[in-house]
Image (cartoon, grey):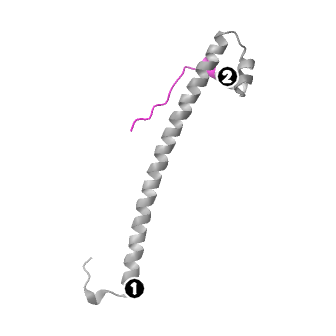
Amino acid sequence: MKVTLQDITPELMQKLSDQNDEQRLHVLTREETRALTHELEYTIMVASQLQARCQMRAKRLEHLGMSTTDIADMFDVNRRTVAKWLRSSIEIEVVTT
């Protein structure tokens, strides 16, 4: 947009300022969204690793002779959760960027 000195009015200045604000907001929103995406991916990875550690511990405790109910009490989770850990393979989520 080519502007001459005579074209500059308070209305034009306001319009340009509004456009600039809108562009900055768009950039900030995009950056914020990307940051949230990275945070979500990291949180999923950490949760996956934590679940894998719980599964390994539960499988060790079962191997040592503890019942599913006792293991559930130790973890303070439902017995069905422990049963699921014991029958599932251990999977760890890895985020690659």
- Please tell me whether residue 67 belongs to the stretch shown in magenta: no
Whole-percent x and y of residue 67?
A: 73, 14
Q: Is residue 19 left or right of residue 88?
A: left
- Circle 1 packing at 10 Å, graded few (<14), some (14-19), many (20+), is few
Nearer-N-terminus badge (1/2): 1
What residue did someone put label 2 on?
82
The disc labelled 2 sits on which kind of residue? Val
- Please tell me whether residue 86 belongs to the stretch shown in magenta: yes
What residue did someone put label 1 on?
11
The disc labelled 1 sits on which kind of residue? Glu
Q: Quadrant of the N terminus?
A: bottom left
Please name the residue shown 67% across and 22% down the image: 82
Q: Which residues are magenta?
A: 85-97
Please name the residue shown 42% across and 68% down the image: 22
Q: Quadrant of the C terminus?
A: top left
Answer above or below: position of 86 versus 13: above
